[in-house]
Image (tube, helix red, strand yellow):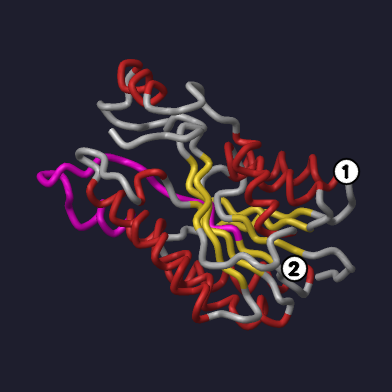
Amino acid sequence: MTTDNHKAALITGGARRIGACIARALHGAGFNVALHCRRSQSDARALADELNAARRDSACVLAADLRDAAAVRELARAACARWRRLDALVNNASVFFETPLAAADDARMDELIGVNLKAPLLLAGELAQELARREGCIVNLTDFYASQPLKNHAAYCATQAALAMLTRSLALELAPRVRCNAVAPGAILWPEDGGAGDDDARRRAVLRRTALARTGEPADVAETVLFLVTSAAYITGETIAVDGGRAPA
């Protein structure tokens, strides 16, 4: 257990894709970063090694199953203990899969709700005191589908809408010492397992409804998160869309 003058952030799902890009952005701004992962431990370790090579003892890996409430609470404790402070929580981890009504069984519902909604709420509760001490912040990663339905994904869309409302609610409950905002990406990275509807035709249709007519980059999301963490001292309770001006279907 060590301590230094660098601020510290916990990033859930921080091993790969957008989460890794957020970790690099915060680290580049001088933050120490705790990289949460579940299955992607080798990717998380490789990223931590990269960041530690750039600045000694500035990144660590914390593995936890966000479906397990006890593991979530231990994750919060470990993140605070690593550098004896925590200034920012970035709830990036999520799961995404189809749940047609006929397939919406308890296990699939519990996973979607547990990872996408319950874990961010539990982490906020566990870390509220430390974040208030540091006048820190929470950034939740929601989705375009928090406000627009996607066929056969009712449970996923519901968790994203709930996370957007959780953001607004926490902004009130944790004020004035903790800010809470959200970022809602659009077509940044296509899902790795998006289900039968995630094909080339559907992707082209999404881009036709996007004003900038192209996909974004993970850096577009990371830069927005970095802004909310480091430069948005008078912004709370807001969701910033990073979607290229995407219109509803």
Q: Locate residue 29, reporting x and y percent.
A: 81, 51
Which residue is at 37% across, 27% downward?
A: 209
Q: Look at the image and say whether residue 2 sits in the magenta stretch.
A: no
- 150, above or below 133, in the image: above
Q: Which residue is mark 1?
A: 54
* 48 relative to 184 in the view: left or right: right
Q: Quadrant of residue 81?
A: bottom right
The answer to which of 209 and 228 lies nearer the viewer is 209
Q: Which residue is mark 2?
A: 82
- 238, above or below 177, in the image: above
Numbered range of the magenta stretch: 90-111
Which residue is at 62% across, 63% downward?
A: 89
Amino acid type shown at disc 2: Arg
Q: Locate residue 17, reporting x and y percent.
A: 58, 37
The answer to which of 245 and 73 lies nearer the viewer is 245
In this view, the residue farthest toward the left is 102
Q: Residues within 10 Å of mark 2 (few under 14, many from 20)?
A: some
Is there a contact, CB below 8 Å, between mark 2 and mark 1? no
The answer to which of 124 and 162 lies nearer the viewer is 162
Amino acid type shown at disc 1: Ala
- Of pointers 2 and 1, the one earlier in the residue sequence: 1
